Image (cartoon, rainbow, N blue to C red):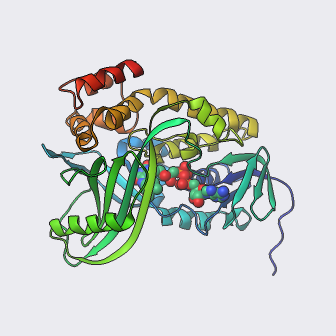
Amino acid sequence: MPKQARSSRPYDLAIAGGGLVGGLVAMALLKLRPDLEIALIEAEDHFGGNHIWSFFESDVEPEHRWLVDPLISRQWDSYDVHFPKYSRNLSNGYFSIESKNLDRALRKQLPASGLKTGQQAKMVKKGLVTLANGSEIAAKAVLDVRGSGDVSALDIGWQKFCGQMLQLKEPHGLERPVIMDATVEQIDGYRFIYCLPFGDRQIFVEDTYYADTADLDSAICHDRIAAYAADQGWQVEAVLSEEKGQLPVIYGGDFEAFWHANQGVDARAGARAALIQPITSYSLPMAVKTAILIAEMSDISQKKLDEMLRNLAQNHWKNGKFYRMLCAFLFLGADPDKRYKTLEHTYMKDEKLLERFYAGKSTRLDQANLLTGRPPIPVFRAIPLLLKYR
Ligand SMILES: Cc1cc2nc3c(=O)[nH]c(=O)nc-3n(C[C@H](O)[C@H](O)[C@H](O)COP(=O)(O)OP(=O)(O)OC[C@H]3O[C@@H](n4cnc5c(N)ncnc54)[C@H](O)[C@@H]3O)c2cc1C
C-alpha cells in the first residue's frame, strides 16, 4: 500500500535542530503529549551528532530521569580526579549517553511525518521553517535549537577536546571514570585527560584544554591520547570511534546583545540560548529540564513558548553570574600554565558543595566557601575581578 501523503495542515511544533535539546524535547512530547504532531528538522543524516554526553547523578532531578534513563549506555557510582597535589575519589554517580542511542530512540518513536533528517533549516521564524531546498514547514509554534549561534556579544574562553574510544589488548584496570587527570603536561591553558571505562578492555580517553582560542589539531590530540595510554601501560588494539568539540566557556558579556544577535524566534534553547553550566559547558541537565518544561506546558503556542524560553534563558544568565566570575578567575586571573590551580583548589571542597557546584545550584554559603582559603590566583588579579562581578 502506498504511504498516505500528510495533509498540508501545520504541525503543532516544528523543532529546528535534532541535537541534544531538539531530540529530548521530541522524546518528552512523544511521552507526555502524544496528541501533538511534531516535525524534527536535522541538517545531518542522523540525530544527535557524534557525542558521548555525560552527567552527574546530582545534575538531573530524580523526577526527570525517566527521559534520559532509557538512553544511558554506562553508569558508575563514583569518579576520580587527579591533580599534581592530590587525587580524590568522589561518590557522585556518573552516567554516559551515546548520541546513537538518541538517534535510535527517535527513529523508533517518531512517526515518519515528523522525521526530517538531511534537511537544513535556512530560516526560522514565527510559524514557519524554510529549508535550504526552498520548501517550507508550517507550524503553530517553532523552536530553534540549532546549536551554538552568534556568541560575539559574550566574553568567552574555550573548552576544546578530542576523544577516542580505545579497544585495548589487556584490561585497563579502571573501575570508575577519571573526570580530570590534570597531572599531565599543562599545554595551551588548563589541560587534563578524561577517561570513561566503558568495558574491561574498552576505554574512552579525551584530551581536553581550557584555552583562549578554539583551534584544535586532532592529529596532535590523538598523539597525546596515545602517549597517555602508553604511560598507563595500555596497549591499544584499535580506535573504535572519535569525537571532538569546541565549546564556548562564558565569563562575561551582554546577554541582551547576545539574544538580539541571534534573530528568529525567542523560543530557543540549549547552546543557542546559553543554557549551559558556565564552567563545564555541560548542557545536558538544562536540556532535560527544558524538554520537560515544554512538554508540560498546557498551551504550546508560539507566544507562550517564546515567553517561557526567553525567561528561562534570562534567569539562567542572571543566576550564572557567580560561575562566570569563577570562569574569569580561570581565564583572566591565572597564567595559562597555572590555570589548573583553580580547579585543584575547588576540588578540595566538601562533596555536597561540589555536587551543587556542578548542578549550578551553589548556595550563598557555598559561594563564600569557594572563595575562601589560599586563593589559587594572585591576589592582585583576584581583587579587580571580585569587584567587577560583585
Ligand atoms: C563532543 C562533545 C561532547 C560533549 N559532552 C558533553 C557532556 O558530556 N555533557 C554535557 O552536558 N554536555 C556535553 N557537551 C556540550 C553540550 O551538551 C552539547 O554541545 C549539546 O549537544 C548541546 O545541545 P544543543 O541541542 O544545544 O546543540 P546540538 O546538540 O549541537 O544540536 C544542534 C543540532 O542542530 C543541527 N543543526 C545546526 N544547524 C542546522 C540547520 N540549519 N538546520 C537543521 N539542523 C541544524 C546540528 O546538526 C545539531 O544536530 C558536549 C559537546 C560536544 C561537542
Q: Is residue 365 above or below residue 327?
A: above
Residue 60 at x, y percent in the picture:
43, 43
- Counting labels gives 0
Residue 259 image point, x, y percent: 62, 35
Residue 324, quarter of the rendered image:
top left
Residue 198 in sight here? yes
Q: Residue 236 placed where, x, y %?
A: 25, 76
Foreground of the two, 294 or 363: 363
290, above or below 106, in the image: above
**Residue drawn at x 27%, y 65% as measured from the top left:** 225
Residue drawn at 53 percent across, 40 percent down: 274
- Residue 86 is situated, as x and y percent measured from the top left of the image, at 13, 44
Res 18 seen here? no
Task: Give the vertical position of 225 relative to 249 (above or below).
Answer: below
Please state if 121 lies on the left or on the right of 274 as rendered. Answer: right
Seen from the viewer's position, the closer of residues 46 and 161 is: 161
- The residue drawn where x is 27% and y is 40% is 339
- In this view, 308 is above or below 193: above
